[in-house]
Image: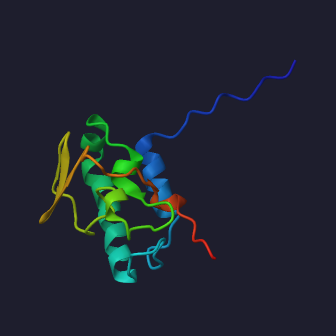
């Protein structure tokens, strides 16, 4: 009787976020609505947020769409679908249960009427 392979433990949310970001080229915008410069700043600021604020992000239960969401067809053109770390490209200063502050930008959680985006690393360019 052969031994079955050991069960695979799914990656933590933090590792999944990091892996998702690292799959993307920091000099090539992954979706519409972002310039190369804005994407490079967002990419760097997001990795910095994961390095410095991961414990708070996990403790407060922030989700992938709340952090990295973009509209599934329009990318960052529809900012009402964008996650906290997609907007602004500034380094995160504070992570609380209901908001994330990055310089002059504060992202509030659970805003009525806001859409739920897909992770920016899952965006697929579509041709018509």
Closest to the observer: 23 or 36? 36
Q: How many marks?
A: 0
Instruction: Report the residue at 19% width, 47% height from top.
Output: 99
Instruction: Report the residue at 27% width, 41% height from top.
Output: 55
Instruction: Report the residue at 43% width, 51% height from top.
Output: 17
Q: Residue furthest bottom?
A: 36
Quarter of the rendering containing residue 42: bottom left
- Residue 88: x %, y % from top left: 25, 68
Q: Residue furthest left?
A: 104
Seen in the picture, residue 81 relative to 66 is either above or below; the reply is below
Asked if residue 35 lies left or right of residue 52, the reply is: right
Seen in the picture, residue 46 relative to 125 is either above or below; the reply is above
- Residue 37: x %, y % from top left: 34, 82
Q: Quadrant of the N terminus?
A: top right
Asked if residue 19 lies left or right of residue 97, the reply is: right
Q: Residue furthest top?
A: 1
Closest to the observer: 49 or 38? 38
- Residue 8: x %, y % from top left: 62, 33
Asked if residue 52 lies left or right of residue 40, the reply is: left
Instruction: Report the residue at 48% width, 78% height from top.
Output: 28
Closest to the observer: 89 or 52? 89
């Amino acid at each position: 009787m052969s031994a079955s392979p050991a069960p695979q433990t799914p990656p933590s949310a933090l590792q999944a976020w990091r892996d998702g970001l690292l799959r993307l080229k920091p000099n090539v915008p992954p979706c519409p609505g972002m310039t190369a410069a804005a994407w490079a700043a967002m990419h760097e600021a997001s990795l910095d947020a994961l390095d410095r604020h991961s414990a708070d992000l996990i403790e407060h239960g922030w989700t992938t769409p709340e952090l990295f969401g973009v509209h599934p067809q329009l990318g960052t053109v529809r900012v009402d679908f964008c996650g906290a770390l997609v907007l602004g490209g500034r380094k995160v200063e504070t992570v609380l249960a209901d908001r994330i502050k990055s310089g002059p930008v504060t992202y509030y959680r659970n805003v009525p009427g806001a859409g739920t985006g897909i992770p920016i690393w899952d965006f697929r360019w579509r041709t018509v």
